[in-house]
Image (tube, rainbow, N blue to C red):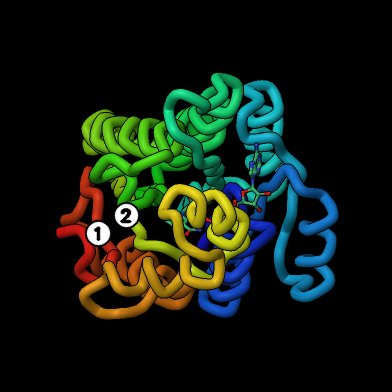
Amino acid sequence: MEVLVIAGGARSLGKYLSIKFSEKKYKVIVLDIDENSLNELKKENDNLITYVCDLTDEKNVINTFDNIDKEYGGINKFIYNAGYANSNIITKFEYDKFITSLNINLNGYFLCSKEVAKNMIKYNIKGSIAQINSKSGRVGSKHNSGYSAAKFGAVGLTQSLALDLAEYNIRVNSFMLGNLLDSEMFESLIPQYAKKLNIKESEVKQYYIDKVPLKRGCSFEDVFNILEFYISDKANYCTGQSINLTGGQVM
Ligand SMILES: NC(=O)c1ccc[n+]([C@@H]2O[C@H](COP(=O)([O-])OP(=O)(O)OC[C@H]3O[C@@H](n4cnc5c(N)ncnc54)[C@H](O)[C@@H]3O)[C@@H](O)[C@H]2O)c1
């Protein structure tokens, strides 16, 4: 059974992906900072293996991947899903929130990918690394300077990792999602978006749906389907890409 590690997989999209991939041919290992959600997840599906890990803490990340190596050996697939968004106009954007965004969206991706790459090379695995990105990593995003800057940075990291790891046949790609309108992250941003757009909170989701040519938000299932293909051997000739999944909103 192939080993698939999901970083930031305890809640929301990550939880959905963890469960769906464990129902396929993968042994799924979930890393997350949120111990309670990891325990809940384990209760729902005890095939999942969980580790509490702060993905932004270098020592914590190194120890966690050392433990995974000791317990399970080689990693075949890795998905970096952890994200953080906070919305505000630049003149009021707090620097510590900008730094938090860089830490969770970008630096954690660096720290994990480094350990994953060492593991895949050690076991001579022609593996695949996927980073969950956003359309805000493709075009600038109003009142989202921290998020957009970090997600753009992650595209540069993906391309560089793809070049570093091509000689080992390890593929690295980013996935540029449209709005996951039913996610906790999007729900939490609704008050800030209503303020930015000067509309009622109840009108925010429809406002975002109207911007999408396919007239709906991105679903968790959309993300699973595209990831399942791109991390598989069927996408063997695809690396260093940032693949749009936006219902046509960003091309
Ligand atoms: N929600 C959206 O509308 C939307 C749109 C486009 C892209 N995305 C991206 O999709 C991904 C998932 O989005 P979501 O809304 O489900 O995110 P989320 O913030 O709800 O969940 C991310 C997971 O990461 C974990 N996490 C956060 N910081 C961590 C840390 N330091 N160490 C370990 N784990 C940590 C959280 O506990 C959570 O389980 C993110 O990368 C996000 O940027 C989301």
- Report the front residue among 26 and 200: 200
Residue 63 on image: x %, y %: 70, 29
Residue under the image location 55 percent in, 58 percent down? 190
| Label 2 SS | strand
Q: Which residue is at a point 24% across and 59% down the rendered structure image? A: 244
Relative placement, left or right, of 229 versus 237 is right
* Residue 12, percent from left and from top: 62, 64
User: Which image quadrant: the N terminus?
Assistant: bottom right
Location of residue 244 with respect to 88 vertically, above or below: below
Q: Residue 119 at what x, y percent from top left?
A: 50, 37
Residue type at numbered disc 1: Asn
Confirm or reject: label 2 Cβ below 8 Å from ligand 1.
yes
Element at badge 1? Answer: strand
Q: Residue at x 51, y 62 (%)?
A: 2
* Amino acid of disc 2: Met
- Residue at x 22%, y 32% (from the top left corner): 163
Q: Residues within 10 Å of mark 1 (few under 14, many from 20)?
A: some
| Res 228 visible | no
N-terminal-most mark, 2 or 1? 2
Res 143 → quadrant: top left
Give the residue pinned by disc 1. 244
Q: Residues within 10 Å of mark 2 (few under 14, many from 20)?
A: many
Could you say which disc has been placed on residue 17 in the image?
A: none
| 2 and 1 marks in contact (CB < 8 Å) | yes
Quarter of the figure with residue 22: bottom right
Q: Horizontal placement of 4 versus 209: left or right? A: right
Confirm whether residue 77 shows in the render.
yes
Residue 176 — which label? Answer: 2
Measure the C-alpha gap from mark 2 to mark 1.
5 Å
